[in-house]
Amino acid sequence: MFPFRLAHGLQQSHQFFIEAISVVIIVDKKSFIGGEVMDDHNLDDKNKFLYPRSRYYGQVKPENLVFNANLQEFAQKVGYITSLETSGKLDPEDAYKQIKALWKQLKRSKKTLFISEEP
């Protein structure tokens, strides 16, 4: 089981929480989440709820699609961090550091994908 609980606050490192939020443990073709065994259909619903994705309307190029997915993931993780900080479960300085690290990761992604500044 994961060493943290969503409903009752975090018991371990907040950084671990942010990194582990996207981890799925597979047990006999089912996922073990929060003490419950979820079938594939319920897992799909859970993922759609926790990681919503919006449709991309920009110029359709592979690098733009990948960057858009990275941008949406960045926004989702920043939302989790800000919620933890607002509720007092994460120190403001830790929240800042985590968001700064995510921002650097997003900038590196943009550079790697060779996305220009101009449309």
Image (spheres, rainbow, N blue to C red):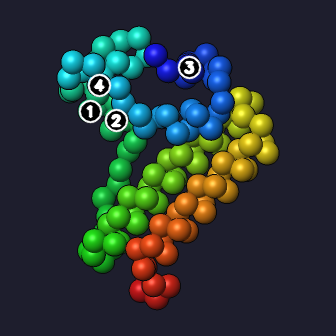
Quarter assignment of residue 94: top right
- Badges 2 and 1: C-beta atoms under 8 Å apart? yes
The x, y position of residue 97, in whole percent, is 72, 50
Out of 54 and 61, give the one closest to the viewer. Answer: 61
Nearer the viewer's eye, disc 2 or disc 4? 4
- Write down the residue under mark 3: 3
User: Residue at (28%, 71%) from the top-left corner?
Assistant: 62
Circle on res. 44? 1
Nearer the viewer's eye, disc 3 or disc 1? 3
- Badges 2 and 4: C-beta atoms under 8 Å apart? no
Out of 56 and 10, give the one closest to the viewer. Answer: 10
Out of 76 and 17, give the one closest to the viewer. Answer: 17
User: Residue at (56%, 19%) from the top-left corner?
Assistant: 3
Quarter assignment of residue 85: top right
- Write down the residue under mark 2: 47
- Write down the residue under mark 4: 26
* One can see residue 72 in this view: yes
